[in-house]
Image (cartoon, coloured by chain):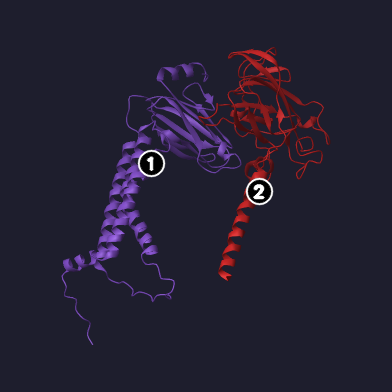
Amino acid sequence: MSDSVDTQPATSKFRAWIKRPYIRHVFLIWLAVTILIELFGPVQAHLMGAPASESMKAIEDTISLFTYAAAPVAALVISVVIYSIFGWRQAKSAGPSDESPAIRTNGPATTAWVLVSSILCVFLLIWGLGEMNSLAPKASSAKPIVIDAIGNQWAWNFKYPGSGNIESHELVMPKDQPIIFHVTSVDVIHSLWIVQLGVKIDANPFRVTLAHVTPTRIGRFSVRCAELCGLYHAHMQTDAVVLSPDDFNKWVANGGRS
Amino acid sequence: MKRVFTALVTVLLGAALVFGIASFLHVSNLQNAPVVAEVRGTAQTAQGVLPHAFIALSTYPDSLAGEHGPSGGSHPDWVSYGPSTDISLPAHSLVTMTITQYDSGEVLNNPYFAKVAGTVATPGDGTADGQMLLDGRPVSQVSPEHIGHTFTIHELSSPSQDNLFVNVPLPAVSDDAMPDSGYTKTPHVITFSFITGSAGKYVWNCEYPCGDGTYRKFGDVMGARSFMSGTVTVA
């Protein structure tokens, strides 16, 4: 016996495949789910409040873009699952179905899957590297202000070594001035998270890690610990206060008192 | 019929499990009877004339005098605040708190908490903003080398309630003055004042690691409520 040879052209096979009812159903579900994700998915990027730095703006843009790019892929998986559950549901009266034949060597499917995945991954990689590069500290006429951020169970405190060693339980910064954080901890691992400024970095015991940001908006923002650190981890929070340069200078001249 | 019965039992077991967890969390979050600040007249402050409330707490080298009862509860040898770790304060008031410190201590791991923060002048005792009265002397900080405890109210980054951050270091009683039993006859007495804002809920805790057994003395009392930490209700 010899295997039958399939002589049907690829275009005809594709046309026949696409006319199958389940393909149309899966496509319609995919379209609906994609639209839903595209509409509501990027909302998550804005739940942390309006950005108060270029870093946070870049983070929100990246989250939104990655959500847009991932939506069709996620929707494909979801639509196949939904159709599998309802469209191929086994009738109660029928017994268990026989196992379907294994699918092997489907060249077009494999090629499409690998190609689309590769394009998406390379795109995300290039975008991510570009954003990281744009956030790197730039040569600026403004001299950076160094702030020591110290975490301990369960409070933050901040020192200003270049401003008379002022100490504060609130993080006070001037607008449009580069800030370099020297972050450390005196007990366990914490994580300094200045939410609306897009800074999140571990505070490791007796080691100093660096982070930088330039606040672009005057206001009062949230500082939290983002690393589970014990009984009152949830209460390890304070405010970041961004002042105008003049008000910040007054705050420094006043020894850190408002 | 058997399948229906199995499903019913499964649902009931699940509901019982959820109810059990919810009950446990509810009981574990119940507050003890709080110490309520007593308003005794008014006081002139930088924010104008405000009601003036008074409240007193103590820190002990054991749990025999606090909210755990004369037996000390399950951990009579743990250090504690008393008479309760839950306190209730009036809103928009000047609160003067007195803490009597009976415990010994060691080096504070973060010197920042040896400094007084968030306090205002107490009328008539000679203190200024950012100071406390330590055994009759106004001070703005103490040596971080010999700290018994701290009383630190946490600021919460929340738009729904006013900020309230207060830190007061409580110097240690010297080891020589610590008796073998009972409490020292020469405790430190610390008095300080702060102004409350609108109604809100906060927590306070001791920022000097005074537990044992776990990493950097953050075991026992530092990992349990109602010994060296508690709640502040401003109402």
Number of on-image labels: 2
- Please give left or right for residue B58 compared with residue B118 in the image: right
- Please give left or right for residue B146 compared with residue A90 in the image: right
Task: Output the chain of dot 1.
Answer: A
Classify residue B100 by image quadrant.
top right
Task: Output the chain of dot 2.
Answer: B
Give the camera-side residue of B195 and B127: B195
Horizontal and vertical percent for residue A148? 49, 31
**How crowded is the residue under tag 2: few (<14 C-alpha within 10 Å), some, or many (20+)?**
few
Q: Secondary structure at mark 2?
A: helix
Horizontal and vertical percent for residue B206? 65, 33
Q: Which mark is residue B24?
A: 2
Amino acid residing under circle 1:
Val
Give the camera-side residue of A1 and A247: A1
Can you tell which chain is drawn purple?
A: A
x 55%, y 31%: residue: B156
Horizontal and vertical percent for residue A152? 57, 36
Can you tell which chain is drawn red?
A: B
Amino acid residing under circle 2:
Phe
x 31%, y 37%: residue: A134
For the N terminus of chain B, which image quadrant? bottom right
Give the camera-side residue of B164 and B12: B12
The residue pinned by badge 1 equals: A43
- Residue extending farthest bottom: A1
Distance CA(mark 2)–CA(mark 1): 35 Å
Classify residue B186 by image quadrant.
top right
Residue A54 in view, yes or no? yes
Above/below status of A62 relative to A14: above
Above/below status of A11 relative to A174: below
